Image (cartoon, rainbow, N blue to C red):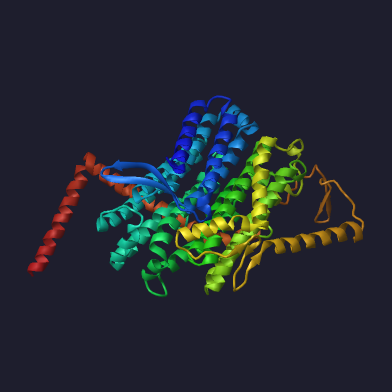
Amino acid sequence: MTLLDHLFIVVFSCLIAISVVRNLPIVDKLAPVLYGLILIMLVRMASVAYGGDAYLSSFSLDLLGFKMHWQFTALSWYFAIITLVAALASAVFMSGDWGRQYREGGGNYGMLQLALIVNVFSMILLLGSGDLLSLFIGWEFVSWASFLMMVLSPSKLAKKSAVKYIVYAMTGAMALMVAIVMIYAVNDSLEFEQISIVFAQMSGSSQVALVLLLFVAFAIKMGLLPFHLWQAVAYAETPGPGAAFLGAISSRMGMFTIVLVIVQFIGLGGLKSVGTSFANMQTLLAWVAALTTIIPTYIALQQHDAKRLLAWHGVGQGGYMLLGIIMFDSIGSAGGLMHVLNHASYQAALFMTVVAVMYRTGTSDLNKLGGLVTQMPLTFLVMLIGIIGLAGLPPMNGFVSKWLVYRSLLVNGQPLLFVAAVLGTLGTILSVYKLIHNTFLGQLRLEHQNVREVPWSMLVPMLGLSVIVFITGFMPGLILPWIASVQESVGLPVIAHHLGGIEYAKGGLDMIWVSGILFYGFGVGALIFYFLGGKSKRVHQYDNYAGGHFLTSDVRYHYSNNFYPGLMHLIGTWYRGSFQWLENSIVSVMSFFSVFFENIYRAKQPVMLLLIGVVLALLALYRNLGVGA
């Protein structure tokens, strides 16, 4: 048996163990231990991340005459590590006081624990796919596992959003199945390697159809435009740490399959060959990615619920990942791949901070919060680190991956795509400032005077993720070898790197120097402020001043309410619910046809059927008379 076999056995055994004890108190201690064990096993397989050969499984399965097998490449290992770190952090977060409060509030805590391990098992199964059939089965497992976690929320909106998600997911699954059938019809094989051969043998129209089918399937899972409407609400309504886990890694399974299938086996040449030199498939996918960085980001800016704001950013950040990958060069693809890890680390941390605030205050409404920095200073610190990463500012890891994507766009002569990416970052900066300002800054509300910091069971995973956000930004060379190994395994140019960043003839990056200069500037500013500046007077935060009036605690005034109203007025006309309109139109058309065919099947309206028959007969007669004349 191979190490991959051992991994599958251990993950499945953990699934059985948690399902047995999920309603017992011991699950709180057992679940983090089991995720830690799986993570240790992945560390044992780390050689694959440093240029080693893929791990093959000795397991195989015959299904309807097709032989399925599994393997773990550098790409699989990279996504698996991110998955297990996110699962471990979520399990620790829910294992103490949060879990007790969730149970006392009527939540099904045992099912939440079960849903988390089912998601981990499904993702490991997908990441270990060795052929198209095992990929499809793993894909379905992931979709239904995510659905299981989404429906655990008692709210009707959550269940409605989960149903919307599974409809999207089934549509993507059907697109993937049709693509697999197209590949099999040409070469009677479902091996990954046959994709390149089959694609070269296809006609131009078949190539277009295959690429579009594959991309639609993977784009739905990733929440790329125009298939993004399901994701934000579904993730935002998922209970507590479940939202942190799904927001960190679940939709990135779409990125995994894009790299595995489209990038590795269709490649740059294949995408460029579909279409003209000006408007080929690579250009189309790049602009889908660019628009995904912009539109969901500015939708996030309009949100007044912290979880929805973060969930919409999760959609937008996927655009940066695809935008970097689709450039097919060393720095762009490195930026796209690195952004998967970076986003998972700060997105999970940010979701946990919002859940922590909800745990203490009972709300995530940004218009009902404010001033919590004095009550929850460590949670504030985690959110501060997270929003710096999400905004793509130094010294956090989001800056490194976004810088690589920006640099790639400029080097490849794509100024319009570069401007689109920068516009997305501008919207991100505005909205994350709104998030931290309305949550932690400003005036503390009277009802939150007794709020205190969350327990250590919740703080430890948040602080741990914050350390990852900072360390991988300060020394990106710690994970760049993994990125280089993934690039090599899928046939992309390999990035040259060092501990501080990258070596590149047209402009490198050393984050140790960047961070050092940044901290030096802060240090000089602090010395001037504390020792050379004028005398300051400390006042209570209730003592405020606005519009020529002194404001005290008895005045119900909070300037974070309806944040950015002017900007909302301007950008509100851009969107106009066009995607919702499109989705509702499709639903209406499908509803009409479903009712129509149901009536035909049940023969509820024979008069209407007779009328249709008469009309068709008259049309046929008219056509025959016309031909005779």
Query: Which residue shows up at 69% across the image and 47% down it?
Result: 382
For the N terminus, the image quarter is: top left
Q: Position of residue 275 (x, y in %)?
A: 36, 71
> Left or right of 626: which side holds 82?
right
Q: Residue at x 80, y 42 (%)?
A: 554
Total label count? 0
Residue 602 in sight here:
yes
> Image quarter for residue 245?
top right
Q: Give the camera-side residue of 230 and 217.
A: 217
Q: Is residue 159 visible?
A: no
- State the quadrant of the C terminus: bottom left
User: Which residue occupies 38% across, 42% down?
Assistant: 58
279 relative to 613, above or below: below
| Residue 261 shown left or right of residue 480 in the figure | left
Judge left or right: residue 456 versus residue 193. Answer: right
In the image, 567 versus 125, the foreground residue is 125
Q: Position of residue 600 (x, y in %)?
A: 22, 44
Rendered view: 469 above or below 453 = below
- Residue 293: % across, % down: 54, 60
- Residue with the most extreme top position: 24
Q: Residue at coordinates 76% horizontally, 41% vertically from top-left?
A: 375
Relative depth, front residue between 235 and 99:
99
Residue 146 location (% of width, % of height): 47, 42
Question: On the image, which quarter does residue 2 sit in?
Answer: top left
Residue furthest to the left in view is 628
